[in-house]
Amino acid sequence: MSFTFTTRLPLSRHAVDRDHLSRAIPGLFDQLWADAATRVLPVWHGKILLAPNDSTSAAHLVLLPPTSVAMSRENPGLCVYLGRSLPTDLPEPTGTRIVAAQLDDDAAARLEPDESRWVNLRMVATVLNDRDAGLFTEALGVLNWHASHAHCPRCGAATVVEEAGWVRRCPVDNSQVFPRTDPAVIVLITDADDRILLGSNAMWENNRYSLLAGFVEPGESLEAAVIREMFEESGLRVTDPAYVGSQPWPFPASVMCGFTARLADGQRARDLLPDGAEILALRWFTRQELVDAGEWLLLPGRSSIAHAMIERWLGAPLPASTELIRP
């Protein structure tokens, strides 16, 4: 399968060797804090700092020496070893080891008191280079996992962070918990006239539309999830689910698996039945209707796989007036 589509997705890009073998090195963080070449990615409430605007270079993350964020054996905070930088054209040499450090409010204020300089991933995903987009996505995903797995799922004991931030161990029975990612399917449905189906979620403005999506259930294949979820949300039976590509979506812990599908034989396009709970409205669009929609229609922002899938079907960039990019 070609990865041409996947490489276009902002959060699927990466240029980091995750260096998994180093995670098990005893005293790894002691080595990292003692190495002046180590760089730290500070994270505060899921946000990071961008380097000051410089017209001569593209937007990039602030990566600091360990002493800048006061990390040490005595004051480690929650840290995750992200791996080694791979590019040859960035300020950090190839092989630079990078650590994500989760800061509390006081530490973040000392580092940068201007809260407007702290930005979230959706705001900057499309302007970062491959390495920085991958670093931010990796850091956010694993730190979100830590936030929801502080206790053992078996006995409730507080778990201990090990393996450079990639394992949490229960001190009672020594069982290990590893980072989790929840797979979800997102589907571009077409009818016999090659129109696409878009839906409006109950949590959105009533003029915001996107592709239908849903989580994969236990014991279910991705293809089966496509058929089930589309029926549950639209009342339509679909067939021929075909995989397009995937993108991590750490909000908080998903990977979006993109599919196309078409209406099943005998299924009428007009038989739309939104579930009324999650999906409040459904509508078919031709390419021309999408282009002509103007400002009334809000579509997914550039950081999402839905945006890229709709553009792939449209065969052209989405009109700027239809885009909604949320902070």
Image: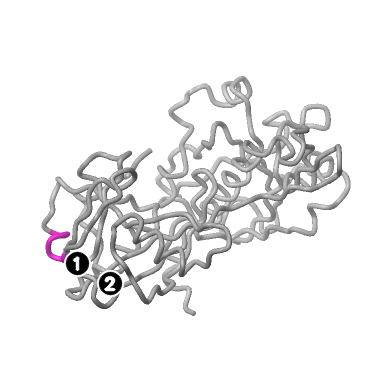
> Residue 129 placed where, x, y %?
49, 55
Q: Quadrant of the C terminus?
A: top left
- Residue at figure coordinates x 26%, y 78% from the top left: 265
Residue 19 at x, y percent in the picture: 73, 59
Displayed quadrant of residue 169: top right
Magenta-colored stretch includes residue 68:
no
Three-letter amino acid code at the position of disc 2: Leu
Secondary structure beneath label 1: loop
Q: Residue furthest front?
A: 266
Circle 1 residue: 269
- In the image, 87: left or right of 69? left
**Circle 2 Cα neighbour tier, 10 Å, few/some/many (<14 / 14–19 / ≥20):** some
Sequence-wise, the earlier of marks 2 and 1 is 2
* Residue at 22% in and 49% down: 281
Viewer-side residue, 21 vs 156: 156
Magenta stretch in the rendered image: 286-291
On screen, residue 109 above or below 220: above
Residue at the location (42% across, 54% down)?
214
Near-viewer residue (261 or 272):
272
| Mark 2–mark 1 CB contact (< 8 Å) | yes
What colour-coding does the image apply?
Answer: one colour
CA–CA distance between discs 2 and 1?
8 Å
Q: Is residue 40 left or right of residue 175?
A: left
| Residue farthest to the right, as pictured | 26
Residue 207 position, x and y percent, is 20, 44
Residue 5 percent coordinates (x, y)? 41, 70
Q: Amino acid at mark 1?
A: Ala
**Was residue 287 drawn as part of the magenta stretch in this picture?**
yes
Task: Name the mark on residue 263.
Answer: 2
Q: Check disc 1: other Cα within 10 Å, few if <14, some if 14-19, many if 20+.
A: some
